[in-house]
């Protein structure tokens, strides 16, 4: 007999149950949790949206989604799984439509003996988030004998003010520890690995500070362009789409001190402490000195410039690339720049962290050559890997230094076993573990920081640097580091290689 994990009992309601995200990510993720035995008998899933649909039609939609997007399933398994799915037409803006939803939730709670545990997942447009949360409470959908948890999709606000307003609305109905703000980068295996690498190895744990680290670099680069999402993207740009959320969340794991324990509360406290010392740049001079914004132009005549993409105005000033330097005003990070960058249509799709260490003070003698900077690289995407660039002795008759590379790659088995971020995040919410979700204080600080940059960009007080698609962004991004005597560890093919720099 195979050992099954302890069964999780709950009614899970998806608002936006017919949408793109639900079909591509959410149903296949819940199915994986079912296959692994976390969900067995005592669970029910409700899908809601405005359109009328029978339970049978909804079950077919879920079945199609699993067949299209899940791996490794049998017909029998899917049929058993979808027997737990129910659909109800519901307009989130119509207060009267919460009553039948309430009746269904209560009914399913009884039918499947789910102990009053409820998760509500808001996979709808962000303008509905506050309204749904308030209505769940006012219309009595929150359970009194189990837990109530709310999963919130991105984006969480479009500025500090709108994020604060949303937070206030959510707090009218839920305590903060019932809120699970999704940032799918926090669900990535190798982002979660940062803590293990930092705190699990004394040689990193003890050197993770300004005495040993020269700079830290975070790159989230994409080869794709706006892919038909111009309506949204042209209002957000790389700054709001990738920096304010994903990049800053990764920074939280890198800049925090060791938490008192590995609980979600202590992890949040440690991240918040670091964020509270983030230097917020004010005005055009500080922003321009520390941030670079760019926009792509086609490298070849057949390729579109960003301002030629469908739905984008010719005179758009939207950034499709951002590079920046962050500073933390605390003892640990005194003088250590955290460089970040993200953009569309860059040379490669990768998410990576490069930690550049200082060389030791040891003098190997006149002929040994200069020591290089040891570098720890954590590659999150496209496949997990950890690289370590070290100083070592070259094999010669004399004593020379050379760089050597240690390289570890996630195995094929690990890749198969790694849950997708959405599966992990839904599972964590079922377990009440908020460690890998965005915390309100972190989100608020990030917005306050970003708002100041947006102000400068909205008034066009900073140059918009054009870069060719297929490169790693404008030269100004490289110059941002060069003026501090630093260089990106990952260089584009238009620049010198890192070995020449270090
Ligand atoms: P879609 O537009 O594909 O789906 C929206 C869903 O909401 C549909 O089921 C729609 O059905 C329903 N809906 C719209 N208006 C109402 C209403 N008034 N009352 C009830 N239901 C309503 O959106 P996505 O699935 O792409 O995105 C959902 C959320 O997830 C958004 O917040 C988005 O930012 C976020 N997200 C999406 C990603 C993706 O890859 N798709 C990635 C990351 C985040 P109907 O019209 O029948 O009501
Ligand atoms: C999303 C952004 O949050 O993240 C997209 O809206 C971006 O523009 C995507 O393409 C990248 O995610 P991933 O996991 O493919 O790196």
Image (tube, grey):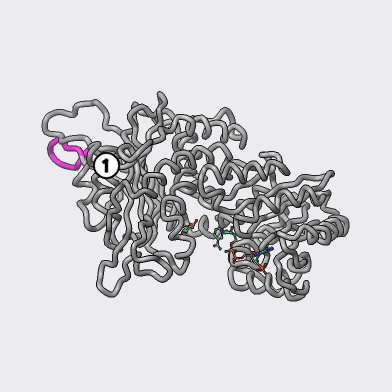
- Please name whichever residue, 474 or 114, is drawn nearer the observer in this view of the structure: 474
Image quarter (top left, top right, bottom left or bottom right) of the C terminus:
top left
Residue 395 on the magenta segment? yes
At 76% from the left edge and 51% from the top edge, which residue is drawn? 136
- The residue carrying mark 1 is 481
What crowding class fits label 1: few (fewer than 14 Cα within 10 Å), some (14-19), or many (20 or more)? some
Q: Position of residue 382 (x, y in %)?
A: 43, 58
At 42% from the left edge and 50% from the top edge, which residue is drawn? 239
Q: Position of residue 325 (x, y in %)?
A: 34, 40
Q: Position of residue 413 (x, y in %)?
A: 52, 58
Would residue 253 be visible to someone looking at this image?
no
User: Over which residues does the magenta segment extend?
Assistant: 393-401
Q: Quadrant of residue 372?
A: top left
At 74% from the left edge and 68% from the top edge, which residue is drawn? 82
- Please name whichever residue, 347 or 134, is drawn nearer the observer in this view of the structure: 134
Dot 1: what SS? helix
Magenta: main secondary structure:
loop
Q: Position of residue 142 (x, y in %)?
A: 79, 48
At 24% from the left edge and 26% from the top edge, which residue is drawn? 361
């Amino acid at each position: 007999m195979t050992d099954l994990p302890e069964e999780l009992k709950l009614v899970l309601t998806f608002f936006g149950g017919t949408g793109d995200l639900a079909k591509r990510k959410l149903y296949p993720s819940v199915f994986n949790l079912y296959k692994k035995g976390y969900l067995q008998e005592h669970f029910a899933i409700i899908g809601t949206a405005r359109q009328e649909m029978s339970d049978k039609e909804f079950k077919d939609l879920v079945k199609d989604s699993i067949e299209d997007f899940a791996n490794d399933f049998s017909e029998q398994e899917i049929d058993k799984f979808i027997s737990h799915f129910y659909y109800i037409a519901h307009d989130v803006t119509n207060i009267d439509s919460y009553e039948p939803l309430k009746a269904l939730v209560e009914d399913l709670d009884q039918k499947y003996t789910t102990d009053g545990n409820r998760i509500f997942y808001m996979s709808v447009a962000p303008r509905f988030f506050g309204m749904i949360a308030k209505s769940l409470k006012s219309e009595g959908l929150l359970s009194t004998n189990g837990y109530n948890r709310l999963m919130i999709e991105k984006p969480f606000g479009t500025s500090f003010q709108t994020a604060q307003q949303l937070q206030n609305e959510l707090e009218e109905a839920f305590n903060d520890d019932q809120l699970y703000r999704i940032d799918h980068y926090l669900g990535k295996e190798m982002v979660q690995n940062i803590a293990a690498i930092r705190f699990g190895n004394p040689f990193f744990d003890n050197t993770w500070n300004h005495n040993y680290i020269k700079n830290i670099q975070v790159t989230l680069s994409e080869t794709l362009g706006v892919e038909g999402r111009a309506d949204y993207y042209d209002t957000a740009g790389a700054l709001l789409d990738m920096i304010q959320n994903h990049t800053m969340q990764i920074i939280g794991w890198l800049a925090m001190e060791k938490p008192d324990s590995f609980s979600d509360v202590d992890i949040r406290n440690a991240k918040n402490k670091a964020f509270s010392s983030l230097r917020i740049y004010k005005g055009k001079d500080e922003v321009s000195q520390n941030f670079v914004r760019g926009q792509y132009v086609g490298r070849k005549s057949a390729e579109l410039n960003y301002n030629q993409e469908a739905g984008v105005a010719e005179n758009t000033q939207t950034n499709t690339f951002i590079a920046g330097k962050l500073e933390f005003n605390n003892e640990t990070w005194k003088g250590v720049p955290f460089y970040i960058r993200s953009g569309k249509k860059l040379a490669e799709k990768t998410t990576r962290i490069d930690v550049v260490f200082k060389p030791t003070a040891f003098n190997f003698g006149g002929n040994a050559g200069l020591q290089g900077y040891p570098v720890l690289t954590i590659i999150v995407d496209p496949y997990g890997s950890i690289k370590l660039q070290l100083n070592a002795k070259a094999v010669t008759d004399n004593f020379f230094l050379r760089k050597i590379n240690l390289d570890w790659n996630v195995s094929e088995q690990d890749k198969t076993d790694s849950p997708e971020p959405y599966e992990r995040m839904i599972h964590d919410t079922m377990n009440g573990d908020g460690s890998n979700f965005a915390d309100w204080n972190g989100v608020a600080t990030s917005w306050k920081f970003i708002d100041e940059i947006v102000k400068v960009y909205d008034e066009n007080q900073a140059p918009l640097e054009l870069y060719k698609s297929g490169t790693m962004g404008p030269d100004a991004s490289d110059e941002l580091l060069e003026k501090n005597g630093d260089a990106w560890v990952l260089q584009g093919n238009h620049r010198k290689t890192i070995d020449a720099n270090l």
